[in-house]
Image: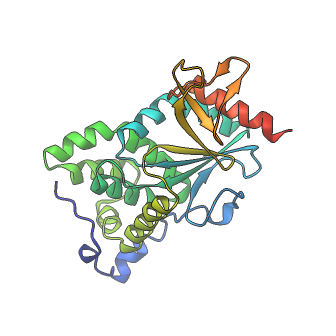
Amino acid sequence: MALSFTRRAFPVLAASAALLLAACGNGNGAQGQTEFEREGDFAKGSVNAPVVMVEYSSVACPGCAAFHAGVNPTLERYIEDGTLRVVFREMLTGSAELAMAGFMLARCVPEERYFDVVDVLFEQQQAIYMAAQRGEARQHFQTIARSAGLSDQQFRACLSDEEAVNAINASNQQAARDGINATPTFFFNGLRVEPQRAPDGSGVVYFANGQPIEDADGFIPAQFTGDTFARIIEYFRSRASE
């Protein structure tokens, strides 16, 4: 795999190359933030949404790809109706090099298209890994860049952006300081939601604040399905309105 992302590999860009990156996104910026966000986060959905989901994730993490395949349509529905805001924090799990390249690419399109590229990276994750095994990861990323509207010159400049490397590394390091050691990891309205054994021994269910999450249908199973996360969102929406 002919990709290497170290500080030494990224000389300061010439002014002409830097101009090509002027449209790169750099986080949430002027859109405003909720109390659960910090500088550098990427987010979508209303800042007034009653439910805020923070997701620590990597575009090279197979579990994260499975989550997005199974749950994303449900999340989008709640985002569109104003119920949910999704906050995305970048981590370098799975293949760190492939995750780094993917996040750099997502940052080099206009900020409003960041999540579009992330979605493609999840959809193409297996193909990217297969390309990497053939030593063709860079070519695959270049194809994605072209589909996102970047010229080959912009793509080369994108993968030479030391500022982006530093920002992604900083996000990954902050996640470690947050105590995150696996992806995907979720927080809803500031509470960590994670799988644990059900109190009655019936299986693995989602817990928040040390307690199993329970609704009218019982404990919520620890699954990456739209129905499961719809129940979690409704659980936190009901408590936000109390």
The C terminus - image quarter: top right
* Vertical position of residue 112 compared to residue 237: above or below: below
Residue under the point 69% across and 47% down: 189
Where is residue 217? Give x, y as percent.
69, 17
Kindly identify the residue that appears in the image at 31 percent across and 65 percent down: 159
Between 175 and 41, the residue placed more toward the observer is 175
Q: Is 137 rendered above or below residue 222?
A: below
The quadrant of the picture occupied by the N terminus is bottom left
> x, y percentage for residue 163?
41, 73
**Left or right for 130, reference 173:** left
Would you place residue 214 above or below residue 174 in this image?
above
Q: Which is nearer the eye, 125 or 225?
A: 225
Return the x and y of residue 116 as percentages of the image width and height.
48, 46
Q: Which coloring applies here? A: rainbow
Total numbered circles: 0
User: What percent of the width, then of the height, locates residue 147?
Assistant: 37, 47
Residue sitting at x 34%, y 48%: 144
- Which residue is most to the right? 242
Q: Residue furthest front?
A: 200
Toward the viewer: 114 or 222?
222
Residue depicted at 27% across the width and 70% down the height: 6
Residue 36 located left or right of residue 135: right
